[in-house]
Amino acid sequence: MKEKSRAGSADSVVPASPPLPKIKTMSYELSIIIPAYQAEEHLDRCLSSLLGQLSCPTEVIVVNDASTDGTMDIVRSFAEKHPQELKIIQNPCNQGVSASRNNGLAAASGRLVMFVDADDWIDGQGCMRLIDLQRQTNAELTCGLFCEITPGRDDKVRFAKRHGVIAVDPQHKFSDMIPHLRLLDNCWGKLFVAELIRQRNLSFSTSLRYGEDILFTHAYMVAAKSVVFDYDCAFYRYFQHATSCVHTIDPLARQQQLDILLIELAKLSSDMLVSDSILLRKAIKVLFCIRRIPGTSQDKKDLLRHFWTSPAFKLGLYECIDRRGKPWHRLLWKLLKVSKNGWDATLVRHW
């Protein structure tokens, strides 16, 4: 959610292009796609953790989204040292993180695809562990954990209460997938099979500024026959900082983006168990975001007024709370609907 050809020489630049036809022969085991916009502060660390650090044929695709800082200087300096590994795509104008990832996907020639944000980095040994696991299981989606790095705070491995390797077949027993859905809230720290992406014509939504990776990973998961989670492999380093999109988007814009996201998520499956399970956490998150905004009760009431008239609410997408939510959430939802524009600003505090 943060903004971010085989190159023959340091100055080889491939223009952004539409999706390519299916590639029959893969030259690389792994394609790593990095969207980069105004990334000069962190990109050196990111590329240093990738280039020359993995013991499998790897291409790193940097999509420069019309940066005006020193991003391209950094990329070219790495390309001089790694001309066979680093591919550069130059967007002619700023297109956003979704379009940049799509442009990277169009140019990727690896059997597997991994996304890395320009301000994050990886542990190479842990990444190879995940690649080896994918080879052993032939999983269509292979997920590791991530360590959240926040300046001034202790590093925190997210979702570390579980341990071991867990394999799930979402096509035949989706209920086994439900405890792990929270790991699909981002696209990084995962191995996707490029062939499945092409077969299903999957891409990142350019209409979403918030949650575009959630939609992509869930759409991919619904299409996958095998998903494997390694809860002991926290190889991805997720760097939290004040300029991330998740921290800079205003509350109303976030609510509107979540509304679009819910509508798109609802289209992924006609199976009510699948659809409700995918929607539930995001439906609750809408109310949780309203609760957490800094401001007065009137500010919350204004957001709630938008909420009650939102397209997702009118489509009944929040009824998943009543069908699948925890008892406490179901009770609060019933009270909210009864007290619409009355006690709702008070009740939402309990989410």
Image (tube, helix red, strand yellow):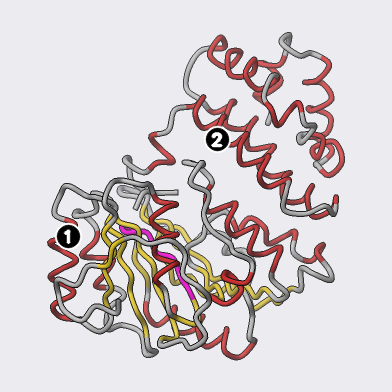
- Contact, CB < 8 Å: mark 1 with mark 2? no
When asked about the image quadrant of residue 257, the answer is top right
Residue 226 rendering spot, x and y as whole percentages: 70, 76
For residue 257, side relative to residue 226 (left or right):
left
Q: Position of residue 109 (x, y in %)?
A: 43, 79
Please tell me which residue is depicted at 67% across the width and 64% down the height of the picture: 221
Q: Which mark is residue 257?
A: 2
The residue depicted at 39 percent of the width and 67 percent of the height is: 33
Q: What is the CA distance from the residue labelled 1 to the residue labelled 2?
A: 31 Å
Q: Which mark is residue 206?
A: none
Pointer 1 local density, CA inside 10 Å: few below 14, some 14–19, many at least 20: many
The amino acid type of the residue labelled 2 equals Gln
At 65% across and 30% down in the image, what residue appears? 287
Question: Considering only vertical position in the picture, is 237 above or below 280?
Answer: below
In the displayed structure image, the side of residue 89 where residue 297 appears, left or right = right
The residue nearer to you, when weighing 286 against 240, is: 286
Q: Secondary structure at mark 2?
A: helix
Along the viewing direction, whichever of 168 and 22 lies nearer the viewer:
22
Residue 258: image x %, image y %?
A: 59, 36
Whether 274 is among the magenta residues is no
Q: In the figure, 141 relative to 268: above or below?
A: below
Badge 1 or badge 2: first in the primary sequence: 1
SS category of the residue bearing label 1: helix
> In which image quadrant can residue 173 be found?
bottom right
Q: Position of residue 219 (x, y in %)?
A: 65, 58
Residue at mark 1? 72
| The magenta segment | 113-119
Q: Is residue 124 left or right of residue 268?
A: left
Amino acid on which the number 1 mark rests in the picture: Met
